[in-house]
Amino acid sequence: MNETLDQKLATLKLGRIRQIYPSWVEQAAHSELGYAEFLDQLLTEELLARQENQLGRKMKAAGFPYAATIEQFDFSLRTELKRTVLMRFFDSSFITTAGSLLLIGPSGLGKTHLSVALGTKMVQLGYHVRFVVAQQLANAVLTAATRADLTRLISSLISCDLLILDEFGYLTLDPHVGPVLYEIIAGRYEKGATVITSNKSLATWGDLVGDTALMMAIIDRLLHHGEVFYLRGSSYRMRGKEPVTLNAKAEGFLSAEKV
C-alpha cells in the first residue's frame, strides 16, 4: 500500500508530500485531524515547497555574483545615501513604471551590493531579473557567431523585468558593443526597469564606447524615468589598511578620491 501511494505521488510530482506524508499520517492519527484538515496541511506544505523551489530557480537564473540584502548595507558609511530615499526603488512600482537607477562612484563603495539587494527583492516579488557584468555582455556580443545569435542575446536582455548592468566603465568597450547597448536600452525604454553601476561619471560614458552621440541617446532614455546616485568615500575593502590615493582623472571624476 505504501509503495503504491509513493509511486502515485512520484507520478504526480508531489515531491514534498512524498517526503512528509508518513510523519503526517502518524501526526494526524495522534492529533485526530479530520480528513479535510489533513489534506489541507499536506497541500500547504507542497505549495510552500514549490514556491521555494521556484524562487531558487529564479535566483539562479538571475545570475547574481553573491547573496546580498539591503539590511546588510551599512548606510552609516555612506551618508550621502538616505535609506528612506533608496527604499523607493525596492518596490514593485520600480518595475511597473520601468524606472532606471544609476549608481556611480569608485570601487568598493557598495554599488554592486545595492544592485544585488535590489535584484533579489524583485525576484522575491516574482519578477524576472538578469544580472550582467558589462564585460561579460561585451564578450557575448563579440563572440556572437550570427546576427540571429546576437538578436537572441538582445531579446533576452530586453524581455526581463529588471536588467542590472554591473561595472560599466571598468574597461573600455569594443566599438561594436555600443550599438548593441543602445538596442538593449532603447528596447527596454518604458518597458523594463534598469540598474547600472559604474565607476565613471556620466560625462565620460561616451568615451567608453567611442561614440558620444550614441551614449547621449542611451543616457537620455535612462534618465527620463531614472535617477542617479553618486557614492563617495573610502572603499569598505580598505578599512583598517593604509589609504591609497589615485589620480581621479583615471577614474573619471573631477576631484581626487581615496579608494
Image: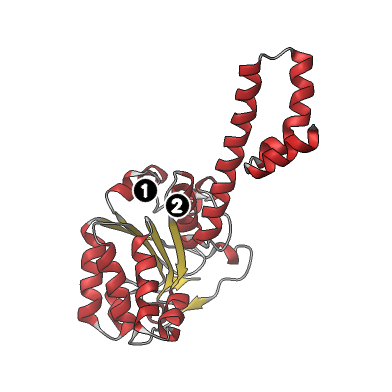
Asked if residue 61 can be seen in this view, the reply is: yes
| Discs 2, 1 touching: Cβ within 8 Å | yes
Residue beneath label 1, please? 89
Q: How crowded is the residue under tag 1: few (<14 C-alpha within 10 Å), some, or many (20+)?
A: some
* Element under disc 2: helix
Task: Please tell me which residue is depicted at 38% across the width and 42% down the height of the picture.
Answer: 84
- Quadrant where the N terminus is found in the figure: top right
Of residue 257 and residue 101, the one placed in the foreground of this image is 101
Q: Position of residue 66 (x, y in %)?
A: 58, 60
Q: Which mark is residue 13?
A: none
Q: Amino acid at mark 2?
A: Leu
Of residue 47 and residue 77, the one placed in the foreground of this image is 47
Task: Please tell me which residue is depicted at 53% across the width and 61% down the height of the picture.
Answer: 64
Q: Position of residue 25 (x, y in %)?
A: 76, 24
Q: Amino acid at mark 1?
A: Phe
* Placement of 94 over or under 176, stated as above or below: above
Residue beneath label 2, please? 118
* Element under disc 1: helix
Which of marks 1 and 2 precedes in the sequence?
Answer: 1
* Placement of 216 over or under 68, stated as above or below: below
Q: Position of residue 123 (x, y in %)?
A: 47, 49
In this rendering, position of residue 46 left or right of residue 146: right
* Placement of 132 over or under 96, stated as above or below: below
**Distance from Cα at disc 2 to Cα at disc 1:** 7 Å
**Residue 29 occupies quadrant:** top right
* Placement of 21 over or under 110, stated as above or below: above
Q: Position of residue 126 (x, y in %)?
A: 44, 46
Task: Please tell me which residue is depicted at 36% across the width and 44% down the height of the picture.
Answer: 92
Colour scheme shown: secondary structure
Of residue 10 and residue 192, the one placed in the foreground of this image is 10
In this rendering, position of residue 99 left or right of residue 196: left
